Amino acid sequence: MKALVLAGGLGTRLRARFGDLPKPLVPVGGRPFVERQIAWLEGHRIRDIVLCVGHGAERVREALGDGATLGVTLSYSAEPEPLGTAGALRLASSFVDGPTLVVNGDTLADCDPWALERARWERGAVGALALFEVADATAQGRVECDAQGLVLRFVEKDPAHRGPAWASGGVYAFAKALWSWLPGESPASLERDVLPRLAAAGRLCGQRLGGTFYDIGTPESWERAERRFPT
């Protein structure tokens, strides 16, 4: 299985701390975050990795090269302009030749990606997303599934919903058929423009997993990851 890492984000909310440093290179525990993602993938025997880069693409390429020193093979799909997550995947379509793991560039999940792909295959779904239980879902969206694990709906931040819920961990297993669902125009969002359509068609499942996930999208979440991965 090949992995695509959506690493083209601007990292606007982190600029007060890290300036113009590309988000994939933001250090967590003294190591660029993207290196931690690559190590996680390599540890699960996924060594063919495409970085979908945008802002700071050349700095990322210079830092990581072809991936040989990390034990993987790295390729790059560089956006000429911001395309959104779905647009970035569409641009990288030439790299896709079968089932593909897609990972948000600011997410590191404590899960087995092969379990996610097995769940997708067993349910005959186009896609499967990793779900993690969060203690308080008032400040983030949640994902609701039926008894068979098919995603029913995505619920945006809802201050009225208190208590635990299942949230997306930013890791997806997709069949090659996913690329026929991507909008032809740019920019487009995987989360807003594609996944709800897949769910409405009964082609998207959610896999509830133990463990947790970390992201570095905000200063607060970066600090949480920094505490988890000390130098």
Image (cartoon, helix red, strand yellow):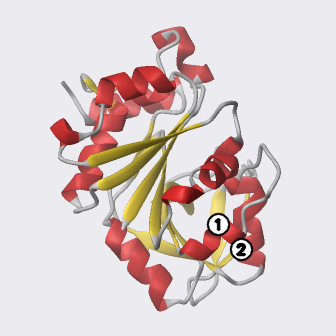
**Residue at position x 42%, y 75% in the image:** 117
Image quarter hosting the C terminus? top left
* In this rendering, position of residue 117 left or right of residue 124: left
Looking at the picture, does residue 22 appear above or below residue 104? above
Name of the residue lying farthest toward the right: 185
Q: Quadrant of residue 152?
A: bottom right
Amino acid on which the number 2 mark rests in the picture: Leu
Q: Residues within 10 Å of mark 1 (few under 14, many from 20)?
A: some
Please tell me whether mark 1 sits on a helix, a strand or a loop: helix
Q: Position of residue 80 (x, y in %)?
A: 66, 31
Q: Residues within 10 Å of mark 2 (few under 14, many from 20)?
A: some
Amino acid on which the number 1 mark rests in the picture: Trp
Q: Quadrant of residue 181?
A: bottom right
First in residue order: circle 2 vs circle 1: 1
Mark drawn on residue 198? 2
Which residue has dot 1 on it? 179
Mark drawn on residue 14? none
Looking at the picture, does residue 182 appear above or below residue 216? below
Name of the residue lying farthest toward the front: 94
**Residue at position x 42%, y 20% in the image:** 59
